[in-house]
Image (cartoon, rainbow, N blue to C red):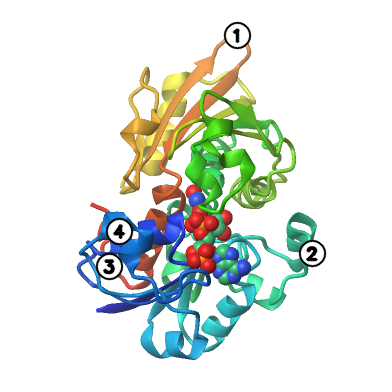
Amino acid sequence: LIRVSILGATGYSGGELIRLLLNHPAVKLHHLTSVSSVGKSIEEIHPLLRGRLSHRFESLNVKKVVRNSDVVFSCFPPTVGMKSTAQLVKAGVKVIDLSADYRLPTGELFKKVYKTTHAAPALLKQAVYGLPELYRKEISASTLVANPGCYATAGILAAIPLLHNHLIDPKSLILDAKSGVSGAGKKLAHNFLFGEVESNFQAYGVTSHRHQPEMETILTCVARKPSQITFTPHLVPMLRGILAVLYATLKKSTRTQDIHALYQKMYQGEPFVRVLPLGQMPQTKNVNNTNYCDIGLVQDERSKRIIVISAIDNLVKGAAGQAIQNMNILFNRSEWEGLQ
Ligand SMILES: NC(=O)c1ccc[n+]([C@@H]2O[C@H](COP(=O)([O-])OP(=O)(O)OC[C@H]3O[C@@H](n4cnc5c(N)ncnc54)[C@H](OP(=O)(O)O)[C@@H]3O)[C@@H](O)[C@H]2O)c1
């Protein structure tokens, strides 16, 4: 059995990990940590899991976690877990970090985006970006997987075939994405109160969202040319789900059927990417509670603009599900385990 511990297990991603891992045939859960809920039973915080496990939340003791874990999922808010992740990796434990701490390539870029100095910049080079559709081989051999951001997962999966096949100017990307409120985590914040979110639709972080440099880093690798993405995230009054709409200008006239065929070819054999038939568009309700990313596309023939739409569940393919997919790759298991 794979011995698993979850740090920051009281939050949305932590709760989703526990829920999914209880159905994993090869996993035994060990330490589930918290700061604010030490000693509480799991069902006090995640009532959905009542009767499913008898653990209690513990404070983080790195030595104990090292002793009893083959892999650790770190679900802290950004920057909180930089040090504990480095300690765990140094001690030989595999870490799948759901936060953004190890997603960017350099300490300089990290400081620019997160306004703080990285605690273990040397480790950034060792971390593998945990998008299996791009880096499956590298993930299988890694000790530190930087699980992608939720918007970044939806945006990058929509863009890869366009860039890989050099169909567009890599600086012409525009991503307009909408997320449910769980994307912001469980912390109390005024903006996410029901009274603020219900019957409302708002843009935020326009030109400054931290997933923009994350996406540009990966898209530049895919395109092998500097890529730019203008990114506008929105908050919509639903609990979970992301719908991302990507626009880009085609370099030359290309038939929509041919672009669609390239998407099908690129994602053929990918267990969790479903390229929809032409004429069909993804919807969040069709992917919620699953690890799927649905992708549909259409061309605005007048402007030669290709429009690619992707839908994911931010807590599953955008967080816990993708993290489990990465764990399965790390331990040479079927990628479906725990995610059926
Ligand atoms: N939500 C999403 O859709 C999503 C998607 C992709 C990635 N992510 C990333 O995944 C991570 C977890 O997200 P989430 O939505 O699960 O967040 P969350 O619901 O706010 O949970 C955060 C967890 O971290 C713990 N925590 C908070 N502040 C802490 C501190 N200063 N020291 C130690 N522990 C602390 C909390 O523990 P206690 O309150 O029990 O002490 C809680 O268990 C974040 O980095 C987020 O950016 C989230």
Q: Is residue 155 left or right of residue 116?
A: left
Q: Amino acid at mark 1?
A: Arg
Q: Position of residue 249 (x, y in %)?
A: 64, 24
Taking depth in this image into account, of 254 and 39 the one nearest to the observer is: 39
Name which residue lies at 67% across and 45% down. Answer: 212
Cα–Cα gap, marks 3 and 2: 36 Å
Q: Amino acid at mark 2?
A: Glu
Which of the two labelled residues, at mark 3 and mark 2, occupies the earlier sequence position? 2
Q: Is residue 132 left or right of residue 149?
A: left
Name which residue lies at 48% across and 54% down. Answer: 134
Please state which of the two labelled residues, at mark 1 or mark 3, is closer to the viewer.
Answer: 3
Q: In which quadrant of the rendered view does residue 78 lie?
A: bottom right
Which of the two labelled residues, at mark 3 and mark 4, occupies the earlier sequence position? 4
Identify whether 125 is placed above or below 206. Answer: below
Query: In the image, is the residue at mark 3 within 8 Å of ligand 1 by its beta carbon?
Result: no
Q: Position of residue 77 (x, y in %)?
A: 59, 61
Determine whether the residue tagged by mark 1 lies in a helix, strand or loop. Answer: loop
Kindly check if marks 3 and 2 are in contact, taking CB atoms under 8 A apart as contact: no
Dot 2 corresponds to which residue? 108
Q: Amino acid at mark 4?
A: Arg
Name which residue lies at 55% across and 47% down. Answer: 184
Taking depth in this image into account, of 110 and 268 the one nearest to the observer is: 110
Which of the two labelled residues, at mark 1 and mark 4, occupies the earlier sequence position? 4
Dot 3 corresponds to which residue? 333
Which of the two labelled residues, at mark 2 and mark 4, occupies the earlier sequence position? 4
Circle 3 Cα neighbour tier, 10 Å, few/some/many (<14 / 14–19 / ≥20): few
Q: Position of residue 297 (x, y in %)?
A: 46, 25
Dot 1 corresponds to which residue? 302
